[in-house]
Image (cartoon, grey):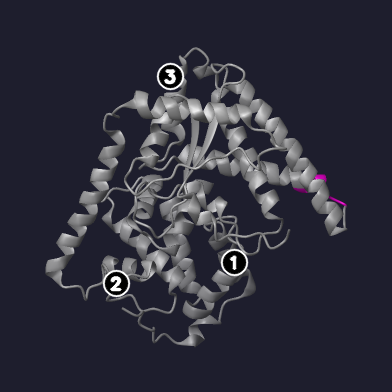
Amino acid sequence: MAPRRSKRSKSRHVQSGPSSIDTERTRFEALIYDENEDKKEIFDKLVDAAGLEKVREVNTKLETLFKVPDDATLLAWHNFILGPLPHILKSMKYYLKLTDKDDGDKIETLIRCAHFIRFPEADTCDLTQEDMIAQLCGSSVWARDIRPQREPAIAAEMDWSTEVVQEGFNAAYQRSDLIVVPTLQKLTKFAGEWRPDVYKAPYTSIIGPTMCGKTRLLKELAAHVCVVYICLRDEKSTGQPPRSTIARHFFPSDALSGSMFQHYLHLLVAILNTVAEFFERKDLSDKSPDDQLSAWYDYSFQIDTPKAEYDDNIVKELKKIHKIVKQSSEGIKEEKAKGKKEDSKLISALTTATRRMNKSIKFKQEGELKVLLALDEASNLIKHTDKKT
């Protein structure tokens, strides 16, 4: 269903002073994820299409819902605006502590605000939540023109398949001695044999058809070694497990200021420092290795429920290392020299983060595998190429 055009007059958009506009711009930008570089353009588009009073109204509604939003909440909101698929809507409810039973009005407000930001000229008076979600997702699956008798069947099928997959993740694992143990032994062997002059990178791939147990194997490996699990599933996919909240950082925008090399070094440093910070916690020091790994799994492994604290800490580390790197090249005007200086600082930061991580996981002996960075649905990275190097 195409969005209806509003008949509101353009004259009501242009009668506010600059101070009022600046105030609303500041409020609006505080509700948008920091790395969204189009904040100004989005705000201008909304004011031009619907007027400052409407934008002020939406700002107030979102501030009431969000209170003091953290980076993880704002990132989830960013993804929600792009398309509130079931797992993204579930994430927003989790971050804002909303339930279908008690907070129906707030959930509808959230959906209407997202729809306004995407389609500011649309008349939503006659649209239901399902209509707005369908338009946001670019899908007609939930639109009103679907025959009523089909809706329950579609919903039941989707809920059933998701439930079955999630139950599979928690079922008792069979033949671990024939699958998990040999896999861990092989990974440890490969890691020990890696040499930069022989191999391009210390990685391998787990390949198999859908539902063969690739992600389930990663979960089992997490009982033996610290697994940093990140699902890079397409943000519009309804597959399981859902896309990880921090997956966005693995897909840099076209406006990337540095090279891909720098971008992913930032990510690695942030991830390793987050791992180290977790295992350096004093409350873990007297726990058994199994309990420490179980605590890490609960803290970071997103199979269903978003891991708000973990996601937020990754973002904080990213900002911290970004600031340090930028400070290292202050005063250098020549781009090539500036890039070289920042590369050097990042490599040094990666070395420091690796040593810190290695030291923090005390229950593993030297030479044993300490961390696995597991990228689920990693094939989604293939289309991204570095045009600057």
**Picture quarter with the N terminus:** bottom left
| Circle 3 SS class | helix
Position of the C terminus by quadrant:
bottom right
For residue 38, which numbered disc appears in the image? 1
Image coordinates for residue 27, horizontal then vertical, percent: 55, 60
Foreground tag (2 vs 3):
3
Q: Amino acid at mark 2?
A: Ser
Given the image, on which type of amino acid does mark 1 rest?
Asp
Which circle marks residue 140 in the picture? 2
The residue segment tinted magenta is 326-331
Query: Marks 2 and 3, how far apart in space?
Result: 47 Å
Give whichever of discs 1 and 3 has the lower sequence position. Answer: 1
Q: Is residue 239 left or right of residue 191?
A: left
Residue 225 visible to the viewer: no
Q: Residue at x 42, y 24 (%)?
A: 181
Q: Earlier in the sequence, mark 1 or mark 2?
A: 1
Indicate left or right for 101 with 327 as reference.
Answer: left
Please identify the residue farthest to the front as the structure is shown: 198
Q: Which residue is mark 3?
A: 290
Foreground pick, 345 / 69: 345
Task: Give whichever of 58, 303 is nearer the camera.
Answer: 303
Distance from disc 1 to disc 2, alpha carbons, whole Å, reads 28 Å
Q: Position of residue 81 (x, y in %)?
A: 44, 62
- Is residue 37 one of those drawn in magenta? no
